[in-house]
Amino acid sequence: MPSTWPVFPVCPAFGFTSAPDYSVTVVERSGGVRSVNRNWYYPLFTYTAVPIGDKPEEDIYRIQKFWHAIGGRSGRFLLDDGTDNHSAANPSDATSRSDQPVLIDANSSPPAWQLFKLYEDDSVVPGFQQLRIIQKPRQVLLAVNDVPVTEGVDYTLDYDTGEVDFAVEPSETDVVTWGGTFYVPVMFESRPEFVLSEKKIRQTGFSLQELRLPRS
């Protein structure tokens, strides 16, 4: 069953900058030597609204209504991040059931099968890679050992956590994969300010922050 969270409205007159970040602490020591401590394993994304259309009034009013309807910064909702919203390794590639891993997440309680997206760049350092938790899937197809499995028969998917419950538990040697699209859970990081000119709202700006959701 799809997530019950509201989805941020499509606003053609707006673009977004997408900024993934890892929390790090940089300490400068004597002689200019730096030590860097990575505080998070998983990244968090910040999105900043960028007006790009000639007539953004309708989209600005749509954002204004959405802001009030969800209760401003108290609201949680879903964003379709056009820079990274599907399972294929490259943006131009079609998705398939074998794109990304479904892994046992030992950090959940009890441990559960979880959708992940894997990022790796063998051209820099062979085997250098990073996992990203997918907690708000949109459309998903699964396979076990490259054999398609059917939602509602072979497994159920929680669209609010990205966790998979199999009717028959895969073994440790089985390779479970998925392909499809996903949302990013976000909230307003800053409040939008609406600029009025000639009795029309001509401009606004705001940013959204990805939410790291608690594990079950």
Image (cartoon, rainbow, N blue to C red):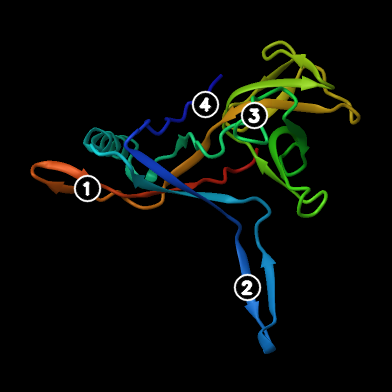
Quarter occupied by the C terminus: top right
Which residue is disc 3 drawn over? 93
Q: Is residue 8 left or right of residue 200?
A: right
Please say if 152 is above or below 197. Answer: above
Residue type at mark 4 is Ser
Quarter occupied by the N terminus: top right
Q: In this view, does 168 lie to the left or right of 28?
A: right
In the image, 59 versus 140, the foreground residue is 59
Which residue is disc 1 drawn over? 194
| Residue at 65% in and 25% down | 95
Of mark 4 and mark 1, the one earlier in the sequence is 4
Please say if 111 is above or below 41. Answer: above
- Indicate the position of residue 32 as horizontal and vertical percent values: 66, 85
Residue type at mark 3 is Asp
Give the label on residue 3, or none: 4
- Tag 4, which secondary structure? loop
- Tag 1, which secondary structure? loop
Spatial CA distance of label 3 from label 4 is 26 Å
Residue type at mark 2 is Val
Spatial CA distance of label 4 from label 2 is 38 Å
Spatial CA distance of label 3 from label 2 is 37 Å
Of mark 1 and mark 2, the one earlier in the sequence is 2
| Circle 2 Cα neighbour tier, 10 Å, few/some/many (<14 / 14–19 / ≥20) | few
Give the quadrant of residue 215: top right
Give the label on residue 26, or none: 2
- Indicate the position of residue 72 as horizontal and vertical percent values: 33, 44
Of mark 4 and mark 2, the one earlier in the sequence is 4
- Tag 2, which secondary structure? strand
